[in-house]
Image: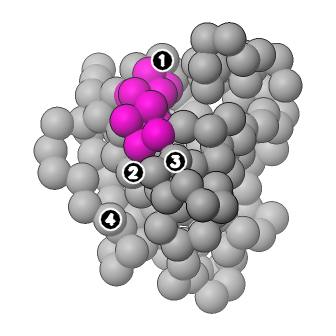
Amino acid sequence: MILTEAELTQWGRAVGAAVDRPTLILLDGPLGAGKSTLARAIARGAGVTSNIPSPTFNILLSYAGRGGLPVTHADLYRIETPDELDELGWEDLVADGLVMVEWPDRAGERLSADRWEISLGFVEGRSEVRDVNGSRHGSPTPIPPLEARSPALGSQ
């Protein structure tokens, strides 16, 4: 699906508003593709009202969302081995709240079987839009479709 930044943000807010716990959303794509933009929009939709900086240097940042929902935004770019996730309390994080993970390949086999994988990419010659695709793995909680006329992500 080709989305503008405004459409990506709108969809992200809808995802955040709809998710239930626990939900693991993996955000994959090259630098500058919109992973953090989407994560911020999802967090806003989940009720986070505080400032949402990029977690690149902190590795993860956690917030309180609507109804006490724990919302965590992780950037695993600086993780060298999946074992480093133990120091972050990884198992507890993914067991209870909404967790969005950038650079998920760094987590290796530590990823839950029940998850959403969202990939973002560039569209050649069109810097104002992104190619966004989602897939469901296992039995994660449902999220809204990318676009009303497209098949719901929950049915993929």
SS at circle 3: strand
User: Is residue 75 found inside the magenta-colored segment of the image?
Assistant: no
Q: Kindly identify the residue that appears in the image at 72 percent across and 17 percent down.
A: 150
The residue indicated by pointer 2 is 37
Nearer the viewer's eye, disc 1 or disc 3? 3
Q: Which residue is mark 4?
A: 54
Residue furthest bottom in the image: 80
Circles 2, 4 touching at the beta carbon (< 8 Å): no
Q: Nearer the viewer, mark 2 or mark 3?
A: 3
Quadrant location of the N terminus in the rendered image: top right
The residue labelled by disc 3 is 129
* Foreground residue among 91 and 28: 28
Question: Mark 2 vs mark 4: which is more N-terminal?
Answer: 2
Residue 131 higher or lower than 114, as above or below: below
Q: Is residue 41 left or right of residue 115?
A: left
Q: CA distance from mark 4 to mark 1?
A: 23 Å
| Residue range of the region highlighted in magenta in the rendering | 4-15
